[in-house]
């Protein structure tokens, strides 16, 4: 009986730890700035910095990310400046681009399963690529642009808000962001900005 109680107590402890991790992750709140109608997402990085909300993340000694977020009545705009001293985009054929440096965005649309966007900044045809997993979103409802920069890459995503199933007046969007990095020795590691994996998220708030 004592062993059974001890085992139950240990399992409850582990469960509380997991729930605590998820709660701490979900408690992170970031704001997206409202942009004017002329924004459209087709702008140099300097304009993104001036018009959107910016957040900096140091993921390891050689990997840094500046995340930018904005929105208007129809679209959600994300910008990513990734600083990485070694980049490879050789894997442009697998569905998750695991063998290439790339970004992953995870959303939780109302009434459906999580949706993951795999964003490859460059490919053999020198264009960014997009794979969508977990939903039947139209590819044309997501626009991806990528600009090489001296210390890494700058990638932007324009996403139709209608994909997320927000109710009228709803202003909070759960989102997780992962940076997949390939080392010079070919090893892959995904750094998640919030929590420990794709099941965790932060709350993006659309500012009035």
Image (cartoon, rainbow, N blue to C red):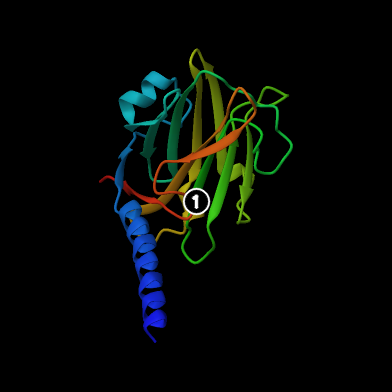
Q: Which residue sits at x=41%, y=71%?
A: 11
- 164 relative to 95, above or below: below
**Residue drawn at x 56%, y 49% as measured from the top left:** 116
Q: Is residue 24 left or right of residue 152?
A: left
Residue situated furthest left in the rendering: 208
In-image side of 145 versus 94 (left or right): left
Residue at the spot of label 1: 198
Q: Is residue 39 left or right of residue 23?
A: right
- Looking at the rendered structure, the number of numbered marks drawn on it comes to 1
Front residue of 40/104: it is 104
* Residue 37, placed above or below residue 19: above
Name the spot of residue 136 as percent of width and height, x first: 63, 56
Name, please, the residue furthest toward the top.
150
Residue 169, can we see it? no
Is residue 187 shown to the viewer in this render? yes
User: Which x, y percent locates residue 113?
Assistant: 54, 62
Residue 206 rendering spot, x and y as whole percentages: 32, 47
Q: Position of residue 174 (x, y in %)?
A: 40, 53
Instruction: Say few, some or many: other residues with alpha carbon within 10 Å of mark 1 (under 14 / 14 to 19 / 20 or more).
Output: many
Which residue is the extreme one toward the front? 2
**Residue at figure coordinates x 55%, y 29% from the top left:** 145
Residue 2 versus residue 56 in the image, above or below: below
Q: Residue at x 38, y 19 (%)?
A: 46
Dot 1 lies on which element? Answer: loop
Res 1 quadrant in image: bottom left
Q: Is residue 185 left or right of residue 167?
A: right
């Amino acid at each position: 009986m004592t062993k059974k109680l001890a085992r139950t107590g240990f399992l409850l402890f582990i469960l509380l730890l997991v729930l605590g991790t998820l709660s701490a992750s979900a408690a992170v709140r970031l704001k997206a700035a409202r942009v004017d109608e002329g924004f459209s997402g087709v702008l140099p990085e300097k304009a993104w910095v001036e018009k959107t909300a910016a957040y900096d993340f140091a993921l390891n000694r050689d990997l840094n990310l500046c995340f930018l977020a904005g929105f208007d009545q129809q679209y959600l705009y994300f910008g990513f400046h990734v600083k990485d001293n070694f980049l490879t985009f050789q894997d442009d054929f697998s569905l998750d681009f695991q063998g290439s440096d790339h970004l992953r965005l995870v959303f939780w649309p109302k009434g459906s399963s999580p949706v993951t966007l795999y964003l490859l900044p460059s490919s053999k045809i020198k264009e960014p690529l997009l794979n969508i997993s977990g939903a039947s979103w139209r590819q044309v409802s997501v626009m991806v642009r990528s600009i090489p920069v001296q210390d890494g890459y700058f990638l932007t995503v324009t996403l139709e808000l209608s994909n997320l199933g927000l109710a009228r007046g709803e202003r909070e969007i759960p989102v997780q962001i992962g940076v997949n990095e390939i080392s010079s020795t070919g090893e892959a590691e995904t750094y998640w900005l919030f929590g420990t994996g794709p099941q965790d998220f932060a709350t993006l708030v659309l500012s009035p």
